[in-house]
Amino acid sequence: MLAKVSSFGLLGIEAYPVEIEVDVARGLPAVVIVGMADTAIRESKERVKSAIKNSGFDWPAEKITISLAPSNIRKEGSSFDLAIALGILAASEQINTSCLSRYFILGELSLDGLVRPAKGLLSIGLAASATGNRAILAPEANAEEAAVVTSVDVYSISSLRQAVDVICSRRVSEPLRINPREAFFQNAGYPVDFAEVKGQYHARRALEVAVAGGHNILMIGPPGGGKTMLAKRIPTIMPDLTLQEALEITKIHSAKGILGSKIGIAGTRPFRSPHHSISDIALIGGGSNPQPGEISLAHGGVLFLDELPEFRRNCLEALRQPLEDGVIHVSRAAGSLVFPAWFMLVAAMNPCPCGYYTDRKTACRCNTTKIANYIGKISGPLLDRIDIHIEVPSIKYSEMTTLTEGEASRIIRGRVNTSRITQHGRFLHEGIFCNARMNTGLIKTFCKLDDAGRSLLKRAMTELKLSARAYEKILKISRTIADLAGSKDILPVHIAEAIQYRTLDRLW
């Protein structure tokens, strides 16, 4: 007998419908799976067989043929287990075939018949909603991800036996209901705060400017200065996360299977900090079955690269295009996928191999050649995309032991929000959303200086021997500082502060 079961597969972060056909016919006992299935799916026959037996059903001693359509797309993962098991039960006439037509079914099976989580349930919920009046059977462990889509009924399933009871109406079960807005606010809140940071007032101010204008930033300083501590608190001062942004972040993390929220939706901006030994595919995304990389997992948040010169050169160079476009294109013979990648790049590095070139307490052991080679690991084109370079010196004992708390993240975030509202109005018809994205034409329009400002900038360019690329960076940073101050015009004091945020141009 033939049975058909509906499910979904993932292609990147998007879901596509998969129809699973199961035919149980006379012949020698065997299980054949066709339809470009990967190893995990081919191995599912052993999991499904044990799950069916341990759930109190009979395993048919006949030839079982399983087809996954469309057959021209490679299927991967173990989320088809539950659908295959129910298809076998229907094809062997242990349950009514008509019961399956209303549901999309997902979930991995354990040997005892319990249902394990599936990836990409938010994407699947959105795709199921577009198909019309159908419900989803989803694993209990993360069914909330699909239930965020309120236009589709989601039934939380913990076992194969429970799934049979629900689809055959043997057990009255109400669909899972999630209020996306309430879940979003319930999940908002960060475990860290800028109030915990001692000293480093210059760095704190530079980070506020960077976040307010969407500028990428590089922190340079000796070990133990607090660069990582500062970086981890940057998401807490970024503009308030909107529900739409939260859904985009959730979609990416759900497809990767790493959504930390138990409420079904992300409530905070992501902070990703890959190790410097990471491969370019893991950083950028891709693979034989393309998946989002670290830059997409940082979408809407922060990508922190600690020990920047230690990263592979090809990894750093691969960042250049996403930093400009906000998306990453992954092309394969079968087609091309687009992953979102709007993130703030925050990098940290020592000033030299030993780490103490700029330190006031410890003498540096590196010669000028070693220092030049160390800095030279970072290419000019990548540095062009980092607007702000600041020194983060080692913290003083008096600052470490002070009982006075620093300014709280919520206060800083309030100023950042106000600045971003100003920028949103300025660039409403320009196709950008922050000062860091201004091109040369927009800089000429929105970064006009008075005579005093031009004189100060000219003197700085001459005396400090700033590079040509620093000129436009200083203007963009000055515009952000003026926005934070609520000033329509860029004043000399704003330019003076912006010049301080070009450390590499001044030291090397």
Image (cartoon, rainbow, N blue to C red):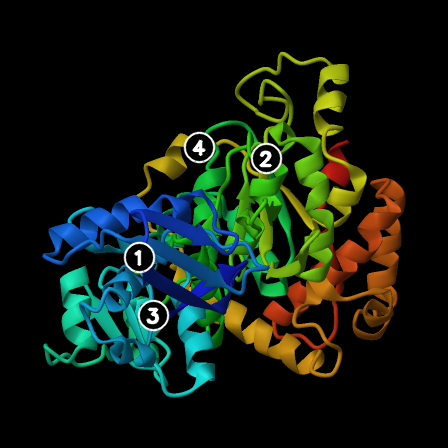
Residue tagged 3: 3
Residue tagged 4: 396
- Judge depth for marks 3 and 4 and give the one in front: 3
Tell me if mark 4 has few (under 14), some (14-19) or many (20+) residues whose alpha carbon lies within 10 angstroms of its own. Answer: few
Cα–Cα gap, marks 4 and 2: 37 Å
Tell whether label 4 touches label 3 (CB within 8 Å).
no
Residue 240 shows in the view = no
Using residue 8 as the reference point, say whether residue 328 is left or right of it. Answer: right
Amino acid, disc 4: Lys
Using residue 127 as the reference point, say whether residue 427 is left or right of it. Answer: right
Q: How many marks?
A: 4
- State which tag comes first along the sequence, 2 or 1: 1
- Element assignment for label 4: loop
Using residue 506 as the reference point, say whether residue 14 is left or right of it. Answer: left
Amino acid, disc 2: Ser
Give the numbered dot on residue 26. 1
- Element assignment for label 1: loop
User: For the view shown, which residue lies furthest in the front direction?
Assistant: 27
Tell me if mark 3 has few (under 14), some (14-19) or many (20+) residues whose alpha carbon lies within 10 angstroms of its own. Answer: many
In percent of the image, x 19 and y 51: which residue is there? Answer: 51
Cα–Cα gap, marks 3 and 4: 72 Å
Tell me residue 505's x, y (percent). Answer: 77, 39
Foreground pick, 469 / 455: 469
Cα–Cα gap, marks 2 and 3: 44 Å
Using residue 63 as the reference point, say whether residue 475 is left or right of it. Answer: right
- Element assignment for label 3: strand
- Judge depth for marks 2 and 3 and give the one in front: 3
Cα–Cα gap, marks 3 and 1: 15 Å
Residue tagged 2: 279
